[in-house]
Image (cartoon, rainbow, N blue to C red):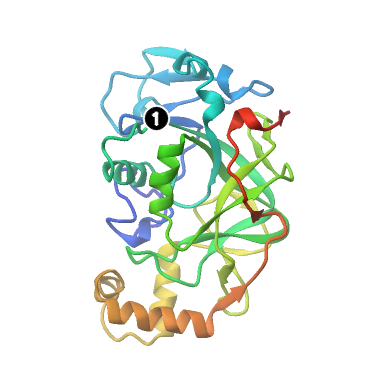
């Protein structure tokens, strides 16, 4: 089982216990299949932040190895290209390095240049969903929890990247938040931010549960994905081994349907999050206000 110290080169597609993936200690640029550490200087806009690069060919890049040179974000964007980006909140596996590698390999012709900046969201928490991802994990949803503060990441995508990520988030709706409750660690706030939204949460023993991987301040109990799958195995009285149970979740369509019917009937809480509204249009950074 994977709990603490999850490997950075293994994705949820490889094993469901990995979900949502190990969290990095720093904002980063994902580019050419690896991470490049970013500064998060207070009061400095994204374009002025520095990115550290290394010559070491490793998925952790300059997050783990000494940087050899530094560039500012703006040096990569000419003629307003940064203003064409869309700020999308990542709260599940879309900041897991191995997961990003997998998703961009689905369309190798797409540029994988993606800024991923740490931040927080207030009055929301990242909780388990009452359905299965294709790889057997219980994925994440963003749920209303008054007073909670949760770590999230703001990713900046162009329209083609957004189409790619949309294609991997089947069942979720891209919604917009305009209430300034998503704030980067730098203090910067974007007038419109978007997130993948699903109005159902797992209700387990009468309460929602959050992910232990994701830092935050919340009244909800935090558990690992592996613990949640163990409890699900007991709840459906599966007699085989844990490995057999996970194999069925991943590869047996009829067994997945049985599990999802159980979750829908016994463990589903439906909500309407007041902070996330239907998005009539998707605005780029150049079309919205920004502040500190």
Residue at the location (66% across, 40% down)?
Answer: 192
Disc 1 secondary structure class: loop
Of the 4 image quadrants, the one containing the N terminus is bottom left
Picture residue at 51% right of the left edge, 85% below the top: 265
**Looking at the rendering, in which quadrant would you find the C terminus?**
top right
Q: Pinpoint residue 119: horizontal percent, then vertical percent.
A: 61, 39
Q: Circle 1 sits on which residue?
A: 113
Q: Determine the residue positioned at 34% across, 77% down.
A: 256
Q: Position of residue 171 (x, y in %)?
A: 46, 63
Q: Residues within 10 Å of mark 1 (few under 14, many from 20)?
A: some
Query: Is 194 rendered above or below residue 124?
Result: above
Q: How many marks are shown on the rendered structure?
A: 1
Compared across the picture, whether 232 is left or right of 269 comes to left
Give the quadrant of residue 146. Answer: bottom right
Residue 285 rendering spot, x and y as whole percentages: 60, 31
Front one among 153 and 239: 153
Taking the view exactly as shown, the residue that stands out farthest to the front is 280
Q: Is residue 254 left or right of residue 92?
A: left
- Looking at the image, residue 43 sits to the left or right of residue 235; the answer is right
The location of residue 142, given as percent across then percent down, is 59, 58
Above or below, 104 against 139 in this view is above
Residue 271 vs 255, above or below: the answer is above
Name the foreground residue: 269 vs 290. Answer: 290
């Amino acid at each position: 089982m994977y709990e603490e110290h999850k490997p950075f080169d293994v994705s949820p597609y490889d094993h469901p216990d990995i979900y949502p993936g190990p969290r990095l200690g720093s904002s980063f640029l994902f580019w050419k299949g690896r991470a490049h550490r970013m500064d998060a200087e207070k009061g400095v806009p994204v374009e002025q932040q520095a990115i550290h690069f290394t010559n070491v060919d490793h998925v952790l890049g300059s997050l783990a190895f000494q940087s050899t040179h530094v560039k500012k974000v703006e040096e990569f964007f000419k003629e307003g290209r940064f203003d064409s980006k869309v700020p999308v909140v990542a709260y599940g596996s879309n900041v897991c390095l191995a997961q990003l590698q997998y998703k961009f390999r689905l369309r190798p012709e797409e540029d994988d240049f993606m800024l991923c900046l740490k931040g927080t969201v207030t009055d929301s928490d990242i909780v388990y969903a009452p359905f299965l991802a294709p790889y057997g994990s219980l994925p994440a949803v963003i749920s209303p929890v008054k007073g909670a503060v949760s770590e999230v990441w703001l990713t900046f995508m162009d329209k083609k990247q957004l189409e790619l990520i949309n294609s991997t988030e089947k069942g979720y709706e891209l919604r917009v938040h305009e209430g300034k409750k998503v704030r980067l660690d730098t203090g910067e706030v974007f007038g419109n931010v978007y997130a993948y939204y699903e109005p159902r949460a797992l209700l387990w023993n009468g309460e929602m549960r959050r992910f232990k991987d994701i830092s935050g301040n919340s009244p909800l109990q935090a558990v690992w994905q592996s613990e949640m799958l163990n409890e699900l195995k007991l709840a459906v009285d599966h007699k085989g081994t844990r490995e057999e149970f996970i194999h069925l979740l991943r590869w047996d369509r009829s067994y997945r349907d049985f599990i999802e019917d159980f979750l829908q009937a016994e463990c589903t809480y439906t909500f309407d999050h007041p902070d996330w509204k239907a998005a009539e249009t998707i605005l780029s950074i150049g079309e919205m206000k920004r502040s500190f």
